[in-house]
Image (tube, helix red, strand yellow):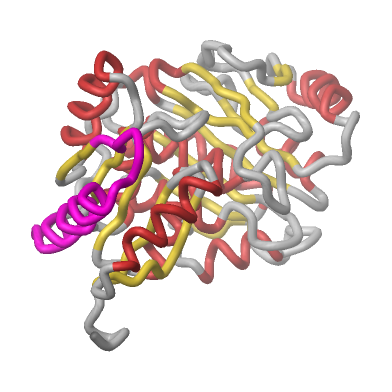
């Protein structure tokens, strides 16, 4: 069978060993080609959008992620057939399977204790069956009003830009989650300085925090910040990559858990972190913004977000705070 006629699959699995094994099992039949691999939800959404595979296999127990939210984010970004594969014990698996199917996955199957030839054939059969199912996109619009959130990311030139934007928000009726690329040890100083500069309550986020409206939560150096169910905050180390904390990880979590109730902005900074995650938020129905070139110290991150078609409005720095506040007030109740 030629490469052009084989099913194109993306495999999402956090364990490199398990992921490599699944890739071999899928490709052994000769009619499936794995075109992308991801270890977490944010990377899965990005690969789904850029590669447009025929099918996605998704581990049901991604660390630090609500896997049902990952499914919802993929279905909001680009509708694809998804097969959930679970190694969870039976008691936990039942609830998790119901959640991912409700979020848009087509089917789910357990991982066997050992991948026998028969189990491998069943995996390939399920993948082919799921790939043949027509699916439609689901915009993430069902989040409760409590899921409202503002997410902001910045890098080079970011601290002063953040002070300007936060100062223009007033007292927002939602938590503000911030990723700022910093050298180790400066995160606490940033939080203290922003609190004095803006008169908003600003603190470093802690794992398990309940994000309160009108408060600002800064991602600590070296830890990803995610919005989770029930407006809870999660910190984690995975995925490893160029930036930790990552704007893409933050925005993808807001897309999954706030959807149309989410507002995001990319400020001045070098590189492209945030473009994919902001696009996921926009596709989920959230409102998205970026700082314009004239007011940016470095236009790299805003430019990447604009080129990815992730930005609703490109605005001067001084207009961003009020624009975010208005966008939040306009989110559906």
Of residue 39 and residue 66, the one placed in the foreground of this image is 39
Residue 323 located left or right of residue 299? left
Provide residue 224's location: percent of width, then percent of height: 64, 34
Residue 167 appears anywhere in the view: no
Q: Left or right: where does residue 191 sit relative to residue 128?
A: right
From the top left corner, tell me how far across and down residue 216 is, in percent: 64, 22
Please tell me which residue lies in front, 135 or 195.
135
Q: Nearer the viewer, residue 38 or 71?
A: 38
Q: Quadrant of the N terminus?
A: bottom left
| Image quadrant in which you'd find residue 153 | top right
Query: Is 304 placed left or right of 114 in the picture?
Result: right
Quadrant assignment, res 3: bottom left
What residue lies at 16% left-to-right and 52% top-to-bottom? Answer: 126
Look at the image and tell me in which quarter the C terminus lies: top left
> Residue shown at 80%/59% (left/top)?
297
Q: Decide if residue 28 is in sight here.
A: yes
Residue 319 belongs to the span the image colors magenta: no
For the residue pair 331 and 225, the one nearer the viewer reads as: 225
Report the predominant secondary structure element of the magenta stretch. Answer: helix
Q: Position of residue 70 (x, y in %)?
A: 37, 40
Q: Which quadrant would residue 55 be assigned to in this image?
A: bottom left
Residue 230, placed above or below residue 57: above
Quick check: is 128 in the magenta stretch?
Answer: yes
182 is higher (above) or lower (below) than 271: above
Q: Residue at x 53, y 22 (%)?
A: 175
Residue at x 45%, y 24% (from the top left corner): 228
Task: State how many labels appear.
Answer: 0
> Bounds of the magenta span?
110-134
């Amino acid at each position: 069978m030629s490469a052009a006629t084989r099913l194109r699959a993306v495999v999402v699995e956090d364990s490199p060993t398990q992921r490599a094994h699944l890739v071999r099992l899928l490709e052994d039949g000769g009619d499936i080609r794995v075109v992308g691999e991801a270890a977490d939800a944010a990377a899965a959404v990005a690969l789904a959008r850029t590669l447009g595979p025929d099918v996605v296999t998704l581990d049901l127990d991604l660390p630090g992620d609500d896997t049902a939210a990952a499914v919802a984010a993929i279905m909001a970004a680009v509708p694809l057939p998804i097969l959930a594969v679970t190694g969870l014990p039976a008691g936990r698996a039942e609830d998790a399977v119901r959640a991912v199917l409700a979020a848009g996955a087509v089917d789910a199957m357990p991982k066997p204790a050992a991948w026998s030839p028969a189990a491998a054939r069943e995996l390939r059969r399920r993948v082919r069956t799921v790939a043949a199912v027509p699916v439609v996109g689901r915009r993430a619009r069902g989040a409760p009003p409590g899921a409202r959130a503002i997410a902001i990311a910045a890098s080079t030139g970011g601290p002063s830009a953040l002070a300007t934007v936060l100062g223009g928000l007033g007292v927002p009726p939602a938590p503000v989650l911030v990723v700022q690329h910093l050298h180790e040890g400066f995160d606490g100083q940033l939080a203290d300085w922003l609190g004095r500069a803006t008169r908003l309550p600003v603190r470093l986020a802690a794992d398990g925090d309940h994000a309160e409206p009108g408060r600002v939560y800064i991602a600590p150096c070296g830890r990803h910040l995610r919005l989770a169910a029930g407006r809870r905050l999660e910190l984690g180390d995975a995925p490893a990559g160029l930036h930790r904390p990552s704007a893409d990880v933050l925005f993808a979590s807001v897309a999954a858990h706030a959807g149309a109730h989410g507002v995001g902005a990319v400020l001045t900074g070098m590189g492209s972190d945030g473009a994919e995650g902001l696009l996921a938020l926009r596709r989920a129905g959230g409102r998205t913004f970026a700082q314009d070139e004239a007011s940016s110290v470095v236009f790299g991150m805003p430019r990447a977000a604009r080129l990815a078609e992730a930005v609703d409005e490109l605005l001067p720095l001084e207009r961003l705070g009020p624009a975010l506040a208005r966008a939040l007030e306009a989110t559906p109740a």
